[in-house]
Image: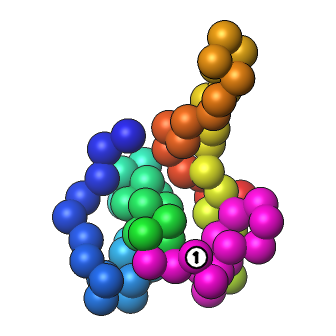
Amino acid sequence: METKYYNRYSYAELRARLDAPDCKQIDVDTIGAWMADYGTQYWNGLGYDADGVSIQPVIEYDTDTEQGEIVGYEIV
């Protein structure tokens, strides 16, 4: 998963990218990573509530190790 640079104060800029007509997967992954780092209070059990948008992690599960890994995020 590739993300853009962000810091604690980047939420407004990252959230605005989701509404942009040229929003790309990297934008979704970046705000998802931001939420995981700084926005845990927005977690609802399934995903993050980002001002009217639900951002959910995409988890790739390895049956051999019985562990999951976040490989990206999606808007639901």
Q: Is residue 52 magenta?
A: no
- Residue 59 x/y as whole percent: 63, 38
Q: Quadrant of residue 17?
A: bottom left
* Quadrant into which the C terminus falls: bottom right
Number of numbered tags placed on the structure image: 1
Q: Position of residue 27 (x, y in %)?
A: 38, 59
Query: Of all residues shown, which one is farthest toward the right?
Result: 45
Asked whether residue 53 is in view, the answer is no
Q: Is residue 57 toward the left or the right of residue 46 in the image?
A: left
Give the colouring mode of the picture. Answer: rainbow
Q: In this view, does 30 lie above or below 13?
A: above
**For residue 8, side relative to residue 63 (left or right):** left
- Give left or right: position of 32 versus 10: right
What x and y, as percent, mark residue 24?
A: 39, 52
Badge 1 marks a residue whose secondary structure is helix
**Tag 1: amino acid:** Thr
Q: Residue at x 62, y 83 (%)?
A: 41
Q: Can residue 34 be seen in this view?
A: yes
Quadrant housing the N terminus: top left
Q: Mark 1 points at which residue?
A: 40
Q: Is residue 48 positioned above or below 2 on the image? A: below
Residue that lies at the very extreme toward the front in this rendered image = 65
In percent of the image, x 62 and y 63: which residue is there?
A: 55
The picture quadrant where one finds residue 15 is bottom left
Classify 10 Å Cα crowding around label 1: few (below 14), some (14-19), many (20 and above).
Answer: few
- Identity of the residue drawn at 63% across and 33% down: 68
Q: Which of 53 and 37 is in front in this view?
A: 37
Q: Was residue 49 drawn as part of the magenta stretch in this picture?
A: yes
Q: Give the range drawn in magenta.
A: 38-51
| Residue drawn where x is 71% and y is 15% of the image | 63
In this view, the residue farthest toward the left is: 5
Residue 49 appears at what percent x and percent y?
Answer: 67, 77
